[in-house]
Image (spheres, grey):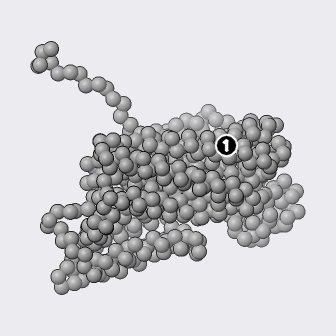
Amino acid sequence: MDASVKPKKKWKLKMPGAFTILFFLTVISVFLTWFVPAGSYSKLSYSHDHLQVTAPSGDKTVYPATQQTLDKLNVKIDVDQFKSGAISKPVSVPGTYERLAQHPASLYSVFTSMVNGTMEAVDIMIFIFVLGGLIGVVKVSGSFESGLSALTKKTKGKEFILVFMVSVLLALGGTLCGIEEEAVAFYPILAPVFIAMGYDSIVTVGAIFLASSIGTTFSVINPFSVVIASNAAGTQFTEGMLGRIIGLIIAVICLLFYLHWYAQKVQDDPTFSYTYEDKAQFDKMWAMDSSEEQDQTFTLKKKIILILFAAAFPIMIWGVMAKQWAFPQMAAAFLIIAVTIMFLTCFGKKDGLGEYKTTTAFAEGAASLVGVSLIIGLARGINMILNEGYISDTILYASSKLVAHMSGPIFIIVMMLIFFVLGFIVPSSSGLAVLAMPILAPLADTVHIPRYIVVTAYQFGQYAMLFLAPTGLVMATLQMLDMKYSHWVRFVWPVVVFVLVFGGALLIAEVLLA
């Protein structure tokens, strides 16, 4: 062969980035509003000691907030669930679906939805900005590098113990209080640690996002999924708890084996990593400076800074579980810690950095997470288009017709797959619960199975989708770690299959034993 003739490069399909994927999904959502029939159920809400039903036409009717009213509306929910605030979002009223005039979105709404979705996500965006600022200040203090140097020496040869501990703790957080969006706070502290241990971005996301999501998938008492879904279904969240606990234990064990297999492969051969082509960029973003010029002395001040930084996370978990904190409260708590660390970093005879460098570090840290924040807003914009086009209820109505009069085992498997699809359209666990449960849960009565099994099917189906759905938290997570969606899918698809197959087997067992 003539050496001067260069071989032709093989054409390789390149997966677009997060912003591009969400842009195309936004365009597709707009087109769907033109072709999918529009329709809506009447929506029931509680306000000022009365119940209000808003018909698809927009007409509103006020009823007394009594159990008799709910029985008359065929809504099998305890009225105290509305009065206590356990159910705060509008609930679909069974048997009220109506076709509506088409509500096609314009191409201009592709862009307005991006703006409106971002505005709707401002609470979590502020939390992420404060988190970024906190990380920036801790980084500039040199505390990360010194602490990491000490940690890697102590964990030499036992690196997976940390992955194990993080995964178990976040799985518990997921099953107890639904920690998922809040888990973004753990990436900046754990990514540098995992890099130092020889792991890649997949291990980081697996130990944080995937572990917390597995916990939520097999949730035992998560108030934002199983509890609110049980309330909306007219059953108790304690029903079926034993099956969910058994499922949780088995699922977490399987996840830990999968993470250990992958982590060990990457440690033994870095080129095995599914994200190896992006390793340099990932390390540049998150690896700590280990150069000789960087002072690695683990001083008392640096220890105090790391203790304050680490304290932010148990405080956040306590606030969510005990005080029902939302993102504004979490952001305020993180900001208090950030300001305290800024004072410690700013002053000092030998290692004080001064006001300008410290505040600049906070601003640059916040700026580094702008892309992550925008991704969350763009994903919410897609949901807004589908809701304003009245597509979601149409799909829900068609689903209810599909499963009617099926045998028990087939019914529950199809139900799980319906929730799998609905999880893409409505990625909010509480949102899907109040939308779908009043409609789909009563169908269990027609095939003589307990309603709590439909709640379990909702958990398995929706969360299997949320491991993949660009409309959920996945894209923000991948954007934060600069990971390609195709690389993530390559790693997570066995977990999705496991949830659907293992979850399906558990559902069939519950139906047969009921």
Estimate the x, y position of residue 300 in percent, counting from the top left: 27, 81
Residue shown at 62%/58% (left/top)?
219
Q: Which of 362 and 151 is in front in this view?
A: 151
Q: In this view, does 232 lie to the left or right of 446?
A: left
- Check the image and report above or below for 341 versus 469: below
Q: How many labels does the image show?
A: 1
Dot 1 crowding, Cα within 10 Å, few <14, some 14–19, many 20+: some
Q: Which of 230 and 168 is in front in this view?
A: 168
Estimate the x, y position of residue 377 in percent, counting from the top left: 47, 54
Q: Name the residue under label 1.
A: 505
Estimate the x, y position of residue 447 in percent, counting from the top left: 82, 42
Estimate the x, y position of residue 492 in percent, counting from the top left: 48, 44
Q: Residue furthest bottom?
A: 349
Location of the N terminus (image quadrant): top left
Residue 173 visible in image:
yes
- Check the image and report above or below for 179 versus 421: below
Q: Which of 163 and 403 is in front in this view?
A: 163
Residue shown at 34%/52% (left/top)?
199
Q: What element carries label 1?
A: helix
